[in-house]
Image (spheres, rainbow, N blue to C red):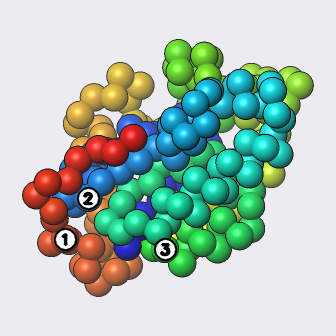
Amino acid sequence: MIVTLTGYRGTGKTTLAPVLAARLGWEWVDADAELQRRAGRSIRDIFATDGEPEFRRLERQTLVDLLQRDRLIIAAGGGAILNEHTRRDLQTAGPVVWLKASVDTIEQRLRTDSATVAQRPHLTSSGGRAEIEQLLAIREPLYRECASIVIETDSLQPDGSQTSIEQLADQVLRELASRLGGSISGSKKPDAGAAT
């Protein structure tokens, strides 16, 4: 089984994935980091050199490969759900958790995230808040269509304090257990760790 975390940039996917993986004894991967590792360059560089269609092709291939694994938490890229085949594949592989946050929260988190500034391109000519609003208008129906579970992450502290992350993990695991009849618990692997 795969559990995929979806949602816009800055909603907490990469923060939450390792905590969930540790709780379950599974592995986890940040799909964007894996894509960059395979490509040997940043997302910003891929966009600048080859354009968004090539990035989306690489994103799709990375996820197809990751979905062949088992007992994995995937922090998917924010735009991965744009591809209808990817949405279907994520749902087939296991529960999809949509991490949702307000425009204000996303804007504030992205402004203070050095990785976003260094590695991620603007996806519209406007950038900033206008870009967030524009892309959420397109993506939110797709996140909703794909999601098994919706979790609000506005309360996740920007400093990543363990208390709030652990509480969020508790909420996700309760929701997963409820939907899966408890079958996700007790599947620990003693040697599992983060895979990025």
**Which image quadrant is residue 133 in?**
top right
Q: CA distance from mark 2 to mark 3?
A: 15 Å
Q: CA distance from mark 1 to mark 2?
A: 8 Å
Q: Which residue is mark 1?
A: 187
Q: Quadrant of the C terminus?
A: top left
Q: Nearer the viewer, residue 90 or 68?
A: 68
Label 3: state its secondary structure. helix
Q: Is residue 48 left or right of residue 102?
A: right
Q: Earlier in the sequence, mark 3 or mark 1?
A: 3
Circle 3/circle 1 CB separation < 8 Å: no
Q: Is residue 94 left or right of residue 16?
A: right
Q: Nearer the viewer, residue 163 or 10?
A: 10
Q: Amino acid at mark 3?
A: Ala
Circle 1/circle 2 CB separation < 8 Å: yes
Res. 160 visible in picture: yes
Q: Residue furthest right?
A: 125
Q: Earlier in the sequence, mark 2 or mark 3?
A: 2
Q: Give me the disc on residue 26.
A: 2
Q: Position of residue 61 (x, y in %)?
A: 64, 56
Q: Amino acid at mark 1?
A: Ser
Label 2: state its secondary structure. loop
Q: Earlier in the sequence, mark 1 or mark 2?
A: 2
Within 10 Å of the Cα at label 3, are there few (<14), some (14-19), or many (20+) other Cα atoms?
Answer: some
State the residue at coordinates (29%, 84%). Answer: 181
Q: Which residue is mark 3?
A: 93
Q: Amino acid at mark 2?
A: Trp
Relative to 61, is 113 above or below?
above
**Which image quadrant is residue 140 in?**
bottom right
